[in-house]
């Protein structure tokens, strides 16, 4: 493909991505442009690099499996002045609970509280209202407790491509250990 | 929701971890007597500052004392077979502390990530009521859960009904009638805005009946409820019946 055609594709991609409300997936872009997926990947990749290298005020990021333009974090103070409500950061307790859910999902409330050592019902509720956490099912144990997991919005909130983008935990222990000790706890 | 923070510790595990780190103790070989004393001193300080010590802290205090007393008991060396009671009584506590430390560190790192609408912004969303939901074909028509439905119902109930001056007689709307109305409304349309189901229903009781009718239709596989994006409007899509 000629260079000019690639730059045309990139400009078109840029226009479509700019006008979208949500992260656009490759499949969706393919139905719009009807070109080979490798070409799209290549165009997107170049766009991402161009925005990153030219140190622009916005960046093109891969979010929750799609691509999206976002402002650069360092310009938040100015953007916030544009009559936009700047939300507070999540509290320490909320972030901790969210981290437990994100790493351990699907996880029950009892497991979250065992891991954190404190009652977490109120925090789970407010995380659900913020749409960061959702109910993903019921655990097949007596009482059928609800299982919680992180939502798509969670990825968008922290600018993650997928769950592998979470910070790496130091050492990994067998998750069964906790389940086991949980059961022992109930016997007592 | 409001929450009493006890000297910046998220909970008993957080406090214990702090004590272990402060005293440079080996987490795998915690001196129980020392840590129990310090833990209890800390609880005393909290009370001295007129802080309500949350029950979780007291449970942990009891656990610590229990473990400490177990360690004081002489071990029955005579028995050859080690049953579970012979295990170091600190094992579970250490497991919990290690596990807690991992997530605490994970959370601390996660907290450094840029957060949407605080550090990072998007172009404002277009008012989704104007956009044609069908143009989103192929996008994530997220099937929604009970929680979203309940939130939507709560929003409806929060809109104050127009005042009624003459309460003549209760016109009972039955669920079957509500279903018939919904079916008629959806007939010939691709979709129906969730809010529009409730047009012309001034009374809370009728809103509730209509809400149950929506649930009933979903249960009977006559329609499904979808949401185009978080906080967006809900839509009812009639499902085509094969029979």
Image (cartoon, coloured by chain):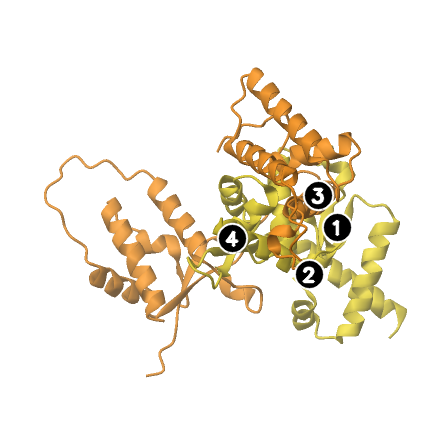
Chain colours: A yellow, B orange
Whichever of callouts 1 and 2 sits on the residue coming sooner in the sequence is 2
Q: Nearer the viewer, mark 1 or mark 2?
A: 1
Q: Distance from label 4 to label 1 (Cα)?
A: 34 Å
Q: Residue at x 37, y 68 (%)?
A: B223
The spot of residue A63 in percent (x, y) is 69, 56
Crowd class of label 4 (few under 14; some 14 to 19; many from 20; radius 10 Å): some
Cβ atoms under marks 2 and 3 closer than 8 Å: no
Q: CA distance from mark 2 to mark 3?
A: 33 Å
Pair 4/1: label in front: 1
- SS class, disc 2: strand
Please state which of the two labelled residues, at mark 2 or mark 4, is closer to the viewer.
2
Q: Which of disc 4 and disc 3 is earlier in sequence?
A: 3
The residue beneath circle 1 is: A167
Alpha carbon separation for disc pair 3 and 1: 14 Å
**Horizontally, is B160 left or right of B40 in the view?**
left
Question: Subunit of mark 1?
Answer: A
Residue B128: numbered disc: 4
Mark 3 crowdedness (10 Å alpha carbons): few <14, some 14-19, many ≥20: some
The residue under label 2 is A66
């Amino acid at each position: 493909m000629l260079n000019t055609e690639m730059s045309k594709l990139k400009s078109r991609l840029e226009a479509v991505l700019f006008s979208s409300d949500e992260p656009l997936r490759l499949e969706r872009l393919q139905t719009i442009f009807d070109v080979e997926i490798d070409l799209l990947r290549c165009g997107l990749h170049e766009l991402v690099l161009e925005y990153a290298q030219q140190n622009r005020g916005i960046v093109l990021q891969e979010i929750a499996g799609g691509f999206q333009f976002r402002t650069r974090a360092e310009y938040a103070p100015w953007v916030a002045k544009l009559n936009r409500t700047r939300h507070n950061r999540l509290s320490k307790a909320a972030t901790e609970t969210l981290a437990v859910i994100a790493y351990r999902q699907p996880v029950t409330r009892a497991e979250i509280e065992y891991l954190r050592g404190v009652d977490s019902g109120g925090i789970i509720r407010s995380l659900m209202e913020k749409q960061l956490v959702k109910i993903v099912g019921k655990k097949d144990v007596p009482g059928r407790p609800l299982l919680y997991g992180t939502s798509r919005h969670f990825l968008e909130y922290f600018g993650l491509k997928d769950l592998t983008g979470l910070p790496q935990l130091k050492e990994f222990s067998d998750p069964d250990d906790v389940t086991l000790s949980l059961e022992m706890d109930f016997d007592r | 929701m409001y929450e009493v923070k006890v000297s910046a510790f998220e909970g008993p595990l957080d406090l214990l971890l702090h004590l272990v780190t402060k005293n440079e103790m080996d987490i795998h070989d915690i001196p129980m007597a020392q840590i129990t004393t310090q833990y209890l001193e800390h609880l005393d300080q909290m009370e001295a500052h007129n802080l309500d010590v949350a029950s979780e802290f007291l449970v942990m205090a009891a656990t610590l004392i229990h473990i400490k007393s177990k360690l004081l008991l002489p071990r029955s060396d005579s028995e050859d077979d080690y049953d579970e009671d012979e295990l170091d009584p600190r094992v579970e506590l250490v497991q919990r502390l290690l596990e807690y430390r991992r997530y605490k560190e994970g959370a601390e790192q996660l907290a450094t990530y840029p957060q949407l609408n605080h550090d990072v912004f998007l172009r404002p969303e277009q008012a989704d009521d104007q956009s044609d939901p069908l143009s989103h074909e192929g996008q994530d028509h997220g099937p929604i859960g009970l929680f979203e439905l309940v939130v939507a119902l709560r929003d409806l109930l929060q809109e104050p009904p127009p005042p009624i001056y003459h309460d003549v007689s209760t016109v009972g709307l039955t669920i079957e009638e509500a279903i018939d109305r919904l079916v008629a409304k959806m007939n010939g349309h691709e979709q129906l805005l969730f809010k529009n189901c409730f047009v012309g229903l001034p009374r809370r009781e009728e809103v509730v009946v209509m809400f149950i009718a929506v649930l009933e239709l979903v249960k009977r596989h006559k329609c499904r409820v979808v949401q185009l994006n978080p906080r967006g409007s809900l839509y009812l899509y009639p499902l085509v019946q094969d029979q």
